[in-house]
Amino acid sequence: MNIREITFTGSFPNYRQCPNGLMPEYAFIGRSNVGKSSLINMLTNRRSLARVSSTPGKTQLLNYFLIDKKWFLVDLPGYGYAAVSKKKRREFEQMINQYLQRREMLQCTFVLIDLRIPPQAKDLEFMNWLGANAIPFVIAFTKADKLKKKEITQNLERFKEEMLKQWEELPTYFVTSAVKKEGRDEVLEFIEQLNQQFYEYHHAK
Ligand code: GDP
């Protein structure tokens, strides 16, 4: 899939205020510093697209980008966000959880995981929660360029082992590098396929 046109639609404080209409959307989420902005910029071929969402005041909102008038890329705030107070953090988590549970146009969520580090409880808990709520997701491992081929295989294996304690199989995953632009075609191809299914289904209705 080639991306020609991207427009920033807006930042929204909750799922109810997000854009209406029949438009498939894909959410991107991960712990801060995982490489989310870099991955989004790499996928969309823009140098600083995701900077919009990391400007002050926007990091805690649901940021929408319309791609080729065909689908939305939704940049979600990082989970485990160090909010000033417990109350704020709860509100914040609730906003994300409600979005994920209730947003009807959400086709799939990309959970970003830094492939260099051992499986983190926070990531595993989050994916368990997605699974328990039947929210479709895939994994995008980031920063693969920082590892040798053998280390990539080893780390994937380590991750698989950890996940298989809870899951019957590893979810679909992509190994990516924003630096080397790896994984881009695979991710976009995946989205394209889901878009096709989406439009076939909705046109047939
Ligand atoms: P975010 O907080 O999740 O949006 O993370 P950023 O995209 O801002 O990236 C965090 C840091 O990791 C920055 O210093 C990036 O340059 C670096 N980074 C992100 N993606 C990659 C990657 O694919 N390879 C390498 N080597 N560094 C990356």
Image (cartoon, helix red, strand yellow):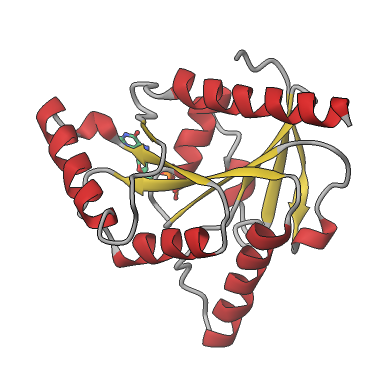
Quick one: 151 or 82, which is closer to the camera? 151
Q: Residue sitting at 72 percent across and 60 percent down?
A: 102
Estimate the x, y position of residue 123 in percent, counting from the top left. Answer: 37, 60
Q: Quadrant of ligand 1?
A: top left
Q: Nearer the viewer, residue 97 or 179?
A: 97
Q: Position of residue 159 (x, y in %)?
A: 23, 49
Horizontally, is 174 left or right of 90 in the view?
A: left
Compared to residue 48, the image places residue 36 above or below, namely below
Quadrant occupied by the C terminus: top right
Residue drawn at the location 58% of the way across and 42% of the way down: 51
Quarter placement of the N terminus: top right
Lateral position of residue 86 relative to residue 178, left or right: right
Would you identify the image quadrant in which residue 23 lies? top right
Classify 86 as above or below 196. below
> Quadrant of residue 71 in the image?
top right
**Which one is nearer the viewer's eye here, 117 or 85?**
117
Instruction: Give coordinates of residue 136: x percent, y percent.
Output: 55, 48
